[in-house]
Each structure stands twice: as C-alpha cells, then as structure tokens.
Image: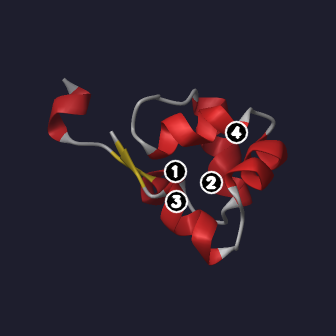
Amino acid sequence: MKTRIKEFRARYDLTQEALAKRVGVRRETIVFLEKGKYNPSLKLAYKLARVLETTIEELFIFENSDLE
C-alpha cells in the first residue's frame, strides 16, 4: 500500500513528530507509514485523514495486489 501522508503533511507544514502527537502515535509509526512498511488500523487511518483534512481513500493508495 502506498501513502500520501508525507505530501499532505507538507501541505500543513507538519513534522512527523507533530503529526504523531496529533493522532496519538509515536513518530516511528509515521515513518513506517510513509515508507509503506506499516498498515494502519482503520481507527488510525481515520485519525490521519481527519488531521490532514482529506479522506482515507485520498491518503492511502491500494494496489490490486493489496486487495487479494
């Protein structure tokens, strides 16, 4: 799964640390999410989308292989 977290984070001039605090996770979690090495829970995906003022679908890009 690909993510656009870094792109949206830049729009709001948020550091990884600041975003992590706003959604209640550690900075390392944001790092792993941005690198595509971690799939968030639905709750975390929702929180990220709300903080970044977008939708889950805009923030996370699912590829066909992710859905199989």
Q: Position of residue 43 (x, y in %)?
A: 66, 32
Badge 2 is on which residue?
49
C-alpha span from label 4 to label 2: 17 Å
Badge 1 is on which residue?
56
Q: Earlier in the sequence, mark 4 or mark 3?
A: 3
Residue type indicated by callout 3: Lys
Within 10 Å of the Cα at label 2, are there few (<14), some (14-19), or many (20+) other Cα atoms? many
64 vs 39, nearest the viewer:
39
Q: Residue at x 47, y 28 (%)?
A: 38
Q: Residue at x 82, y 48 (%)?
A: 22
Badge 4 is on which residue?
27
Badge 3 is on which residue?
6
Q: Position of residue 41 (x, y in %)?
A: 58, 26
Residue at the top extreme, as displayed? 68
C-alpha span from label 4 to label 3: 13 Å
Residue type indicated by callout 1: Ile
Q: Is residue 62 above or below residue 55?
A: above
Secondary structure, mark 4, is helix
Mark 2 or mark 3, which is nearer to you? 3
C-alpha span from label 3 to label 1: 14 Å
Q: How many numbered marks does the figure carry?
A: 4
Mark 4 or mark 2, which is nearer to you? 4
Does the CB distance between marks 2 and 1 fall below 8 Å? yes
Quarter of the image for the C terminus: give it.
Answer: top left
57 vs 31, nearest the viewer:
31
Q: Is residue 16 above or below residue 1?
A: below
Q: Earlier in the sequence, mark 3 or mark 1?
A: 3
